[in-house]
Image (cartoon, rainbow, N blue to C red):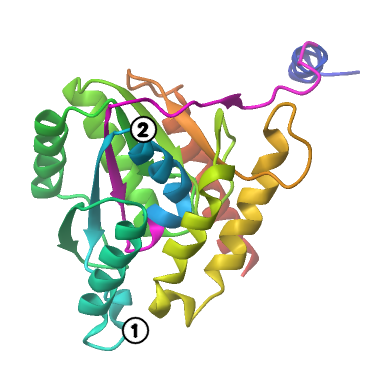
Amino acid sequence: MKSFITKLLQTKISRLQLCPLPAPLIPIEAGRVLVFAPHQDDETLGCGGTLALLRQKKCAVKVIFITDGAGAGSLDADAPAIRRKEARAALNILSIDDIEFLNEPDGSFRASAGFEKKVRQLLQQFKPDWLFAPSVLDYHRDHVAAGQAVLSCWQQCGAPGRAFIYEIWSPLPATHVVDIGDAIELKKQAISCYALPLSHCDYLSASIGLASYRGLYLPGKPGGNYAEAFSEIEKQASFGGLLQKMLNLRLYLESLLKRQI
């Protein structure tokens, strides 16, 4: 005999749409866009094509790099300076020159009262129409901690605009996709500026491959398309909201993987 919970789930499943695709997200014109990147390269890998299109639409784009890029001590002492130089070169290709480095510890970032105060100040001063933050569903703990802190500050301080999570290591349950076909070459060139990360991992192939896959979601454009995917976060903080659900899933995945070791 089926349990009540099983019957309830089956009823809900029977009411699902056939294939609910992420909605197209059209870059705004002459808006203000604030981007938080845990590491130098996350901004380009996650939303570089979208940022290039926003600049072409005359948007003011500011990128905040959260950590110092030291690689949690695994890189040479000159790595932070190299990664800052690479970041400037990459963002120059995307036509972005408004950059700030917060120099939090790479690999062990934790949101402090001082960091949250700085985020609130940036939100209140810049007043973004669009805010981009890393995914709290991501495998990298810096991304999880940074995304949760930034988005919680945005929800709590009543900042204007819309907030979106971008994907790096872990694909998102996307609510929106941006067609970046016209900016894919700029994204490739910008990623290629990050020689230090590319010497450790083929981020270029991975990122462009993900963009190609996301291109399948673009309506009426079969084959050879590229897109970046995002999840929009609701304005009001809620234990039942998307941000909290993603965070719960990330914590569950980690606990499950630990039991398998």
Image location of residue 137, percent across then percent down: 49, 45
Type of amino acid under label 1: Ser
What label does residue 11 carry, if any? none
How many residues crowd around disc 1 within 10 Å: few (fewer than 14), some, or many (20 or more)? few
Q: Is residue 36 left or right of residue 254?
A: left
Where is 184 relative to 59, above or below?
A: below
Task: Residue 148: say if magenta.
Answer: no
| Residue 169 can be seen in this image | no
Q: Decide which of 28, 21 is in the foreground and name it.
A: 28
Residue at the far right in the pictured view: 1
Q: Decide which of 258, 159 is in the foreground and name it.
A: 159
**What secondary structure is the magenta-colored segment mainly?**
loop
Q: Which residue is mark 1?
A: 74
Q: Is residue 181 left or right of residue 164?
A: right
The span from disc 1 to disc 2 (Cα, nearest Å) is 39 Å
Q: Are marks 1 and 2 in contact (CB under 8 Å)?
A: no
Specify the segment rendered in magenta.
15-42
Image location of residue 29, percent across then percent down: 34, 25
Where is 6 relative to 229, above or below?
A: above
- Residue drawn at x 53%, y 76% as measured from the top left: 201
Type of amino acid under label 2: Lys
Q: Secondary structure at mark 2?
A: loop
Image location of residue 248, percent across then percent down: 48, 39
Residue 86 position by quadrant: bottom left
What label does residue 57 carry, if any? 2
Q: Is residue 142 left or right of residue 249?
A: left
How many residues crowd around disc 2 within 10 Å: few (fewer than 14), some, or many (20 or more)? some
- Residue drawn at x 41%, y 55% as measured from the top left: 44
Q: Which quadrant would the N terminus be assigned to in this image?
A: top right
Q: Nearer the viewer, mark 1 or mark 2?
A: 2
Which label's residue is closer to the chain start, 1 or 2? Answer: 2
